[in-house]
Image: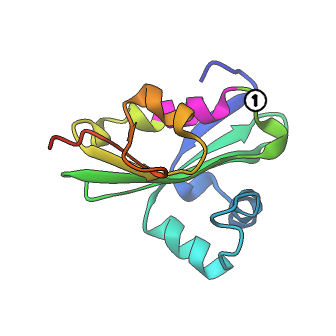
């Protein structure tokens, strides 16, 4: 990560559930998820985060669901509103996309308004929300 004030973490071990909940409450797609749903989704996904080094607060979050053979689904990418505009979303997605376990797999995601974030990583819009990369048909 280029910004020395932040650090990307890989795995949910360094994440506190209330901090993840706080971030997801800032979204239109996950604001109403229960604590149990978020905890379960974290257990059943590969989680990534962005930590603000100043106070070790979780300011970014993303998950990947995958079979690690053919396809992965990138979801719940969120950066805290007070930390947006610093390239943290791009850095987080770049980190995830660089992981060897996802190389050569088809990537999918759903977004209404962040097409510009994902297009540089090879994602293409199939309809107004669904984006995919590596679709070979």
The quadrant in which residue 89 appears is top right
Which residue in the structure is indicated by mark 1? Answer: 85
Asked which secondary structure carries label 1, the reply is loop
Scheme by which the image is coloured: rainbow
Query: Going by the image, does 123 lie left or right of 27?
Result: left
Q: Quadrant of residue 18?
A: bottom right
Badge 1 crowding class, 10 Å Cα cut-off, few under 14, some 14 to 19, many 20 or more, is few
Q: Is residue 90 magenta?
A: yes
Residue, x 62% and y 52% (percent of image)?
14
Percent across and percent down for residue 2 are: 63, 18
Q: Nearer the viewer, residue 27 or 125?
A: 125
Residue segment shown in magenta: 87-95
**Up-down relation of residue 3 to residue 59 (above or below):** above
Coordinates of residue 125 in the picture (x, y in percent): 41, 42
The residue lying furthest to the left in this view is 137
Q: Quadrant of the C terminus?
A: top left
Instruction: Locate residue 35, reporting x and y percent.
Output: 67, 77
Name the image quarter holding residue 28.
bottom right
Q: Quadrant of the N terminus?
A: top right
Q: Is residue 13 above or below residue 89?
A: below
Residue lying at the far front in this picture: please name it: 127
Residue 116 versus residue 42 in the image, above or below: above
**Image side of residue 78 versus residue 5, left or right:** left
Total count of labels: 1
Q: Which residue appears at 57% of the width and 42% of the height?
A: 9
Q: Main secondary structure of the magenta part?
A: helix
Give the residue drawn at x 20%, y 51%.
70
Q: Where is residue 131 shown, x and y percent of the image?
A: 40, 46
Residue drawn at the location 69% of the way across and 60% of the way down: 20
* 107 lies left or right of 114: left
């Amino acid at each position: 990560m280029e910004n020395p004030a932040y650090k990307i973490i890989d795995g949910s071990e360094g994440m506190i559930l209330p901090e993840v909940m706080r971030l997801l409450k800032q979204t239109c797609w996950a604001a109403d998820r229960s604590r149990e749903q978020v905890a379960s989704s974290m257990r059943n996904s590969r989680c990534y985060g962005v930590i603000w080094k100043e106070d070790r607060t979780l300011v970014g979050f993303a998950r990947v669901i995958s079979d690690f053979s053919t396809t992965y689904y990138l979801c719940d990418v969120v950066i805290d509103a007070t930390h947006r505009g610093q390239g943290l979303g791009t850095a987080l997605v770049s980190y995830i996309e660089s992981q060897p376990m996802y190389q050569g797999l088809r990537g999918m995601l759903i977004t209404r308004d962040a097409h510009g974030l994902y297009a540089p990583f090879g994602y293409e819009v199939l309809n107004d929300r669904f984006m995919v990369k590596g679709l070979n048909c």
